Amino acid sequence: MVLSARFHFISWRKVYYMNKNTASQKMLSIILLVLGVVALGVAIVLDMQHSDAGYRGFLLILGAILVLAGLYFFPTIEHHRAIINFIFLFPLLFTFVITVIVPMALGIFYSFTDWNGVKMNNFVGFENYASMFKDPAFIWSIVLTFLFVVVNMILVNVIAFLLALMCTTKMKGVDFFRAAYFLPNLIGGIVLGYIWQFVFSNVLIKFTASAFGMRNSLLATSRSAFFAIIVVYLWQYAGYIMLIYITGLTTIPKDVLEASAIDGANATTTLFKIKIPMIASTITICTFLTLTSAFKQFDVNMALTNGTGSVKFLGKTLSNGTQMLALNIYNTAITKNNYALGQAKAVLFFIILACVSIIQVRISNSKEVEM
């Protein structure tokens, strides 16, 4: 009896102190979490107010550390592993939030104001969105961008797939051709644009003038300049997409191809009935990459033509005949110093790109199932 009572007393005392330690640990965790959130909030408010306080960065880092410490000391056993996993992922998540989510949220907010790049004075509502749709130059940039996307999405994938078929054969020097086709992708867009500007305006003219009598550069008119941009984009991007198609083609089981050859399938039948259906997921990836890349075309457009060129659209003569959407946003915000309107155009650009990308992926996925 005495030993049993003593055992129960010790057990009760142990549970008491464990509960006490758990309560104090929970209180410490809550305090750290509250202090961390407050520090982060103050840092964000100071940044939005463009304060000159030098301790904004210190508050931001301190707040993040306090939040992590509060999560770590939180007295739970069931979710402790999830909390530890979150702590390890926090640096990446924090960087993503600070560099992507917060700027995007601020950008959406600034699009409803008269923000001049430094501060805002008034909340103007949808005025920026209304004014950009009244601008024929902006509407033309959207139309030109969609045309550029459709043409390049088809041509890049077709050319890249044909190059991949050639580079997966047993021809001699196939490794050299793979490297040669991919090499243009390593050149920066600005440098690439100036190189091809020299080619179109000097080298190509001297060659075509003697052979075909063509004495004007491809960059002389808006139509030919648009064709020149497509040529440069194909030359730069087809090699990169080719490598992805090569990866997809090399993953096709050889026994399937051997079985089709034994059954008497010719090269065309094997291509359309076996190879293409079996790399449907690769086609989805390549289509998505070419779609988003063509939509965001900026550097080659700026270096090659800077968006100039005369074109008639909606009954008006415009001077931005080769200016695509990304360059139009850049010129609105940076060149014309209208950051609020540029931000509104950027928000619309994001919505268009997101919607088109989601639709493309859904359509491609449905085609994969059919294949």
Image (spheres, helix red, strand yellow):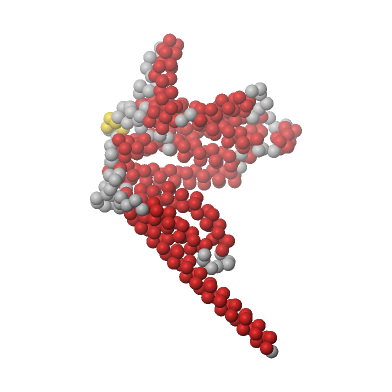
Q: Position of residue 83 (x, y in %)?
A: 54, 61
Residue 303, compared with residue 75, is above or below; it is above
Tell whether 189 sits left or right of 319. right
Residue lying farthest to the top in this orientation: 210
Q: Is residue 159 visible?
A: no
Left or right: 53, with 205 as reference point: left
| Furthest-right residue in this view | 262
> Residue at point 68% right, 30% down?
266
Image coordinates for residue 59, horizontal then vertical, percent: 39, 55
Residue at 36% across, 53% down: 55
**Picture residue at 27% right of the left edge, 33% below the top:** 315
**Image quarter of residue 145:** top left
- The quadrant the C terminus occupies is top right
Residue at 41%, 20% in the rendered image: 198
Check the picture and name the quadrant holding the N terminus: bottom right
Of residues 199 and 72, the one nearer the viewer is 72
Quarter where residue 203 is shown:
top left
Counting labels gives 0
Q: Position of residue 77 (x, y in %)?
A: 58, 67
Where residue 2 appears, as percent x and y from the top left, is: 68, 88
Kindly give the residue lying farthest to the left in the view shown. Answer: 121
| Observer-nearest of 266 and 119 | 119
Q: Nearer the viewer, residue 63 or 159?
A: 63
Q: Nearer the viewer, residue 48 or 277?
A: 48
Does any portion of residue 46 appear in the rendered image?
A: yes
